[in-house]
Image (spheres, coloured by chain):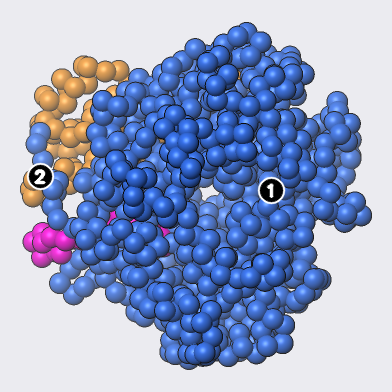
Amino acid sequence: MPQYGLLIDYEFCTGCQSCEVSCKEEHHFPVGKWGIRVLDDGPWQKDDAKDEGSCFNWNKIPVPTDLCDLCADRLAAGREPICMHNCLADVIRFGTIEEMAAELARKPKQVLWAPCE
Amino acid sequence: MEFKNDLGKPWKFQDGDFTVIRSSVWSPPGCHPVGCGIKLYVDKDGRLDHVEGDENDPITHGRLCPRCVALKDYIYNPTRVIYPQKRARDQRGNAEAWERCTWDEALDLIMDNWRRLTDEYGRETLAIFVGTGRDGMLSQDFQLSIFRTPNLAYTQSGYACYQPRMMSSQMVLGALYPELDYAGGLEGGYDDPEYCVPELMILWGKMPLASNPDGFFGHAVIDLMKRGAKLVTIDPRVNWLATRSVIQLRLRNGTDAALAMAMCNIIISEDLYDHEFVEKWTYGFDEFKERVAYMKPEDAARICEIPVEDIYTVARMYAAAHPASIAWGLAFDQNTNGMQAGQCVLAMICMCGNLDVPGGNIVADLSMPEDLTGDAAAGQSAHNTDTRAFITEGWYQMTDEERDRCIGMDKYPLYCNQITGAQADCVLDTLETDEPYPIRMAWIANTNLLAPTNSAEPTRWHAAFQRSIDFAFGTDCFITPTIQAVCDVFLPLSTVAEHDGVNRTHYGAASITTGCGNKAITVGEAKSDLEIYCMLAKRMAEMFPDDPKARFAYEKYPDYHDYLEKNRLEGRHAFNEVRELVKFKRKVYYKKYETGKLRPDGQPGFLTPTGRVELWSSAFANNGMDPLPYYYEPDLSPRIPEKTAEDLELKRNPLVPEELDAQWHERDLPHEEIIEKYPFIMSTGHRRYSSFHSEHRQVAILREIDPNPMIEINPKDAERIGVSDGQWCEISNMFGSAKFKARVMPTVHEGHVEVDHGWWFPEQDGSEPSLFGVWQSNCNDLIPEHHNNALGLGAPYKSACCNVVPLKESYDVDMEAFGERFGKLV
């Protein structure tokens, strides 16, 4: 049973990929390997009435990969995961599944990941 | 969950086996000077192990973008050069011909050649080529003091970055660019009782998230959105922020002045403006009103190709919101009509009561040496500093006669005196013709201008360097295509982790913070720009021991910390004291026009001839330009204008002879022919998180994010011309051509393309003629020189034309091989 999760607010994730690079530096992942990836849903037009920004769906969604260990070494030292620490838009939170689920209920456009045991 | 943090830790502390240095990072690698807080973890052997954002930073609070997260990969990159190098003159362009030398030998070569060439041609034969976003560019005064040449050359056509906005602000407000207020100067930040979150923010030709333009922390926009601020985007392309905006105006590239005039027209004709402010603090309102009345919203809608009701909506929305702010960006600079658009934006800010109020646009206050002591300093923050007053020191060391020899001074005196250097486009003329005198020596200082960054028509610059430059030296962290092509001596620069430094947001113009870069490590024999300036100054003093002017720079700044203290810190602070603060805020005041903080005489009002905001600008009038705003069709657009610039009787620059002006434009085509041959509107200059202009191309984990130079094209256009997503294309126009990989995007209008800039390929052959593949995807070869306004400012980087044809070949980088070669740090 997973105990911990990453809660991500994708309303405000800007897709800067600081999490990807931070994770690669922390875990020494080479080119071609990632612990978290920012996936792009969009841009595609959800409203054909006009073509300005609000008519588009474009969500950047950080997804932990199979290599994510939730920064076990950092957690052991009492530090938060590095993706959360450096996140430019400040949209990543870490905690127990229970805590994060309670946070999830407070606001839409969030996603809760439980990548590992 | 609660986590440990380092809040309150000193600038240097121990964490297990690591010594941690807290620092405010700015350059190299280049960036805009936010001075983001960073923690540098150094191991027992003195090597940088890793970095993290510093949670103590009062602006970034521990957040860090991917470029600085990957700092270690830049510092220990296998292609970085960390020892001085020399190369025989006849081997220029040969990547294999560099030989390591000592600093003494390199400096001997530089000074001996300087002596030889200046004896023959005069001191002005040295041109100092500078770029952007690097620490060295903020010390141009020092460079000029050493060599006493007026030819400081920032080579981007029309100085089309920041400077046109600065100039329009000075012409209208008598102050520098007024930034969107994000509480950066208030001790309590967003929660400070003095602050007010804007109801509305307009991002106009500015997408600040990736690049922190001019030192504005881009993600402050996100912070403010989370606190309830609504967003309006004015941009041709739908970017990510536009999808979070309540409304977007997707105007056609280069038509900003028409839109801005129409919005002013609506605000005035519907009586949505602040009568008290207008009556008390503006000049020329009636004339301005009459002028903008001629731009009817319906006409602007047709010109900008947007729905007229949206123009009304945005104008009314901005006028109704209090406070509201407008961040107006690079699109105003990369447009020869952009200063008029800026004049209208400033008018909107003033007319709607948003000037110098919390959550509005903050007027840059004065920075005067007088500020240092006495009454003017009373009530100011203990750490209040500003360097603008000092960056002209080197310029005014020269005599009037010496400055008059600056390239472009005859045609664009305001430009040259403002930037204390040569007019960009005119420098190319001189390199090509030796008129009015030869430039035979070059210092390539922190610029990679042959890569599509800091020049128009780089192919011409390359040929001009080859014909004219007898000796050149370069200062940088890597051998760039420009250094490879031009230089005989290479001096290795240290990165921000390897030297002490002081940075200021907005390059010292209206700074909200001052940050200290704290040295953490040493790599090879690399030295900072300022250390190198000190060494050159010493050589100059030794060469002319009896000449006080030659000794000036060395005597004033024997050590680079002297420069940091005397100049960057204005003599107010000892570096060793403020380094412990790492970063400190500069107190921001509101409504300074009421309190005399905008004028050296301490009187209320603005620093303009009338003491008011000049909607009818005396400064424009005094410099041969129309004092009121106007719109004309971009020179290179594939549209047939209803009125040409000539019809509008726009004043040409009387200092440029007609035949010369005609010669500068002889390759232009009439709009009808452009429609036929080059029907796409081409825009460049948008930013990506993975690079700063031409920097970071060799950092594998960043290159992996954006491996190839891209062109964004609308799906209908892609289908029509037979381009599929991921296919390579060639773009071309009457000035040049370049290749890009297509990304089919519905967010780009039909008939428009967005093209990446700053590309070169460290993985390709470094020698001539390849120069790291710098000609392959060089979008600036499609941008012509000398398409500037009458002040020599602005250039059409965002409103050129091109044709697009699909290619069969692929030029994709092999990322696996790239990772093998560039990802293994040394």
Foreground pick, B402 / B46: B402
Circle 2/circle 1 CB separation < 8 Å: no
Give the residue number, with chain letter if any, for mark 1.
B793
Left or right position of B496 against A53: left
Residue B765 visible somewhere in the drawing: no
Left or right position of B487 against B659: left
Q: Which residues are magenta?
A: B12-29
First in residue order: circle 2 vs circle 1: 2
Query: Could you give the CA–CA distance between mark 2 and mark 1, rounded to whole angstroms?
Result: 51 Å
Q: Nearer the viewer, mark 2 or mark 1?
A: 1
Residue that appears at 86% across and 52% down:
B661
Is the residue B106 above or below the residue B279 in the image?
below
Give the residue number, with chain letter if any, for mark 2.
B4
What secondary structure characterizes most of the magenta part? Answer: strand
Residue that appears at 57% across and 65% down:
B396
The kind of residue tagged 1 is Leu
The kind of residue tagged 2 is Lys
Q: Position of residue A102 (x, y in %)?
A: 15, 20
Left or right position of B12 against B771: left
Can you tell which chain is drawn orange? Answer: A
Chain letter of the residue beneath label 1 in the structure image = B
Residue that appears at 67% across and 53% down:
B415
Q: Position of residue B44 (x, y in %)?
A: 15, 72
